[in-house]
Image: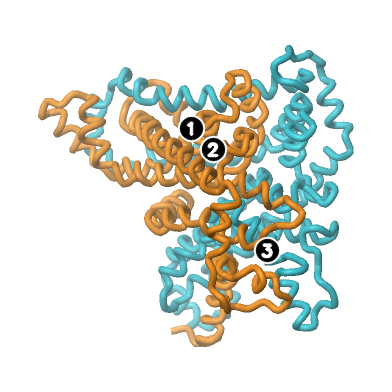
Chain colours: A orange, B cyan
Amino acid sequence: MKKRSGSFGKHFSVLLVIIVFVGPMVWILINSFKPTVELLSPSPTFFPRNFTLEHYWNLFRRVNFSRYYYNSFIVALSTAVITALAGALAAYSVYRCRYPGRKILFRLFLSSYVFPKVLILVPLYIMFSQLNIIDTPLALVAAHVMLTAPFSVWILRAFFESIPIAIEEAALVDGANRLQIVFRVFIPLAAPGIAAIGINGFLMSWSEYLFASVLAITDINKTLPVGMAYFLQEYSIEWGVMMAGSVLIALPPVVGFAIAGRYFIEGLTAGSVK
Amino acid sequence: MGKKLKPTQNFAEIVFNDPVLGILLVLPLLFWVLATIIYPLFNTIYFSFFNIRYIGVPFQPVGLTNYKYVLQDPSFLLACGRSALWTLINVTLQIVGSLVVALILNQNFRGRDFIRNWVILPWVLPTVVVAIMWKWILDPTHGVVNYLLINLGLLAEPIQFLASPQWVMPTTIFINTWRWTPYFSIILLAALQTIQRELYEAAAIDGASTWNQFRYITLPVIAPVLSVVALNSFLWSVNIFDTIWLLTRGGPIDYTTTLPIYIYKKAFQEFRFGEASAASIVMFLGLLLIVVVYLRRLFRESEEEGL
C-alpha cells in the first residue's frame, strides 16, 4: 500500500540490522574454524580456506576448559532447579493464596530485581568467607539463585493467571487436600512456565560474571566466564582458542533461546506494552 | 488479565484463604531473599563505618572516615562523572537505536518473525563472549574493522579502539549500546504492532507526510513505552559492570572506571572493603530517586492487574 521508498530501501535496512546485530557472532563462528596462520594473516579471508578444528582440540588439551564447562554446568543446573522450585512455590503463594502481607512480599521480590547488584557484592563475599563456603559451588549457586529467583515470581504471573481457578476448585471438591492440589494438579499444569523460569535461571547463571569472579577463585572452581576472562587479559591472546571457546560458551544460551525464546519475548513485551 | 478471577472470586476467596499454606510455600524464597539480599544490604551500611582490610580479624570501627575518604578521592569523583556520561550517552543511543531498529523491523518483509526473534542475539550471548568478539573484531593488528577502514583508504594507521584514552569510552559505549538495542527494540516493536495499518493509509490519503504520520500516529502510541525503555535503560546502564570490566578492566589508566568498576577495584584489588561499602552507599543514594520512580511504576502496574 505504501508507495514511498520502495523495496530496495526496505530490504537494505533489514539487511543492515541483521549484519550489525547477528553478523559479529557469525564472524566468530567462521573464524573459529580457520587455522592460526589464516586467522592472523594480514589479509583476512571470509570463509576458511583450510577448515580446521584445532582450536577446539586445543581448548580441551591446553586449557582447563572441560573443567570450567563442568563447573558452569553444575552451578547453572542447581540454580535452575532451585529457581524453578522456590519461584513456583512462592508464585503460587503470592498469586493464589490469601493472607495478610502477601502484597508486601510480592513487592519485596519485585524490588530485589531493581537495586544495583554491586551493592551486595562485598557483604556477600564477606558473609560467605565467614561461613567458609567461598570458592565452592555452593556460594555461587546461592548468589545466582538470589539473582534469578525473585524476579521469576514476576515472570510466572502470566502463566499462573492463565490457569483457571475452577480446576483447583474441582480438585478440592474431589477431596484432594491443599498440598496435593499444589503439587499434583497445579504444578503439572504450570509446567511450561516453570520450565521457562528454570531455563532463564540456567542461562543467567551460565553467563554470570560479577559474582562468579569473586566467589570462584582457584582454577578448578572457575566457571566458564571467569576462566575465559582470565585468558582475555593476557598480553598475547590466543585468538583461535578464544574464538572456539566463545562458540562453545554461546551454544547453550543460543539453543535455550531457540527453545524458550518466544516465552521471553512474550514476557518481555507483555510487561511493558499495555 | 486478572479480571478473569472475578466470577468465582467469592468462592475463591473461601477456597484460598489458607494463610498457613501460603506462608509455607513462600518461605524458601523469602528466606533466600532475606539471607542473600536484605541482610547483606544492611551489612553494606554497617561495613561502611568500619576499616576492613582482612576478613577473619575483628573489624575496626572508624566512624565516617570511609565516607570522607571516598568523597575526597579524586578518582571516585571522576568515576561519578564517567558513570553520568556513560549512562546519559548509553540511554540516548539505546532509545534512538531501538526506535530505528523497531521501525525497520515493523515493515513487511519475508522471514519477518524469524528475523525479529534472532535480532535479539546480542542480548542472549554471555558477556564474556561479547567481550571476546569485540576485542577480536576491533583488534588493531588482526581485527576486521581496522582492516576494512585502512583498505577503504579511510585510515592511515589502525585505531587502538580499546587501548587509547580518546577511543576507549566511545567504543565501550558503542558495544554496550549494541548489546541492549535489540532488546529494547523488541519491546518497542510490540507497541508499534498495536497500531492499525489503516490509520497510516487514511493519513496518507489525506496527504500527511511520513514525518507527520510518525509524529501524530506512531509517537503518541509508543510514547509511554519509550518512557519504560528509558527507565530500564537508565537503571541497567548505570549498573553495567561486566561488559566494561571484561573489555578494558576499567582502563587504560582509569578511563573507563565507572562507579561499579571503582567499587569492584576498591574491594577486590585494593582490599578496602569499608571504602568500597561507603562508595556503594553513596552510589545508591545517588540512584535512590530513579529507583523509587521505577518501583512505583512497577508496583502500580502489577497491582492494577488485581493482585
* Most foreground residue, A50 or B216: A50
Question: Which residue bears the numbered disc 1?
Answer: A109
Task: Name the mark nearer the viewer: 3 or 2.
Answer: 3
Residue B76 vs A267, above or below: the answer is above
Q: Quadrant of residue A117?
A: top right
Residue A113 badge? 2
Find numbered disc 2 in the image and state the secondary structure of the residue it sits on. Answer: loop
| Left or right: where B235 falls relative to B34 | right
The kind of residue on which mark 3 rests is Trp
Percent x, y for residue A139?
54, 29
Q: CA distance from mark 1 to mark 3?
A: 39 Å
**Is residue B80 found left or right of A256 in the rendered image?**
right
Judge whether residue B302 can be spotted in this image: no
The residue beneath circle 3 is B136
Q: Residue at x 36, y 33 (%)?
A: A85
Residue found farthest to the left: A174
- Kindly indicate whether the residue at mark 1 contacts the one at mark 2 (C-beta within 8 angstroms): yes
Three-letter amino acid code at disc 1? Phe
Q: In the shown orientation, is residue A74 left or right of residue A26?
A: left
Q: Nearer the viewer, mark 1 or mark 3?
A: 3
Q: Could you tell me the amino acid type at mark 2? A: Tyr
- Of A101 and A177, the residue lying toward us: A177
Binning the other alpha carbons within 10 Å of mark 3 as few (below 14), some (14 to 19) or many (20 upward) gives many
Q: Residues within 10 Å of mark 2 (few under 14, many from 20)?
A: some
Residue A149 in view (yes/no): yes
Q: Tell me the chain of label 3.
A: B
Local SS, label 3: helix
Looking at the picture, tell me which residue is in the foreground, A270 or A228.
Answer: A228
Q: Residue at x 71, y 53 (%)?
A: B247
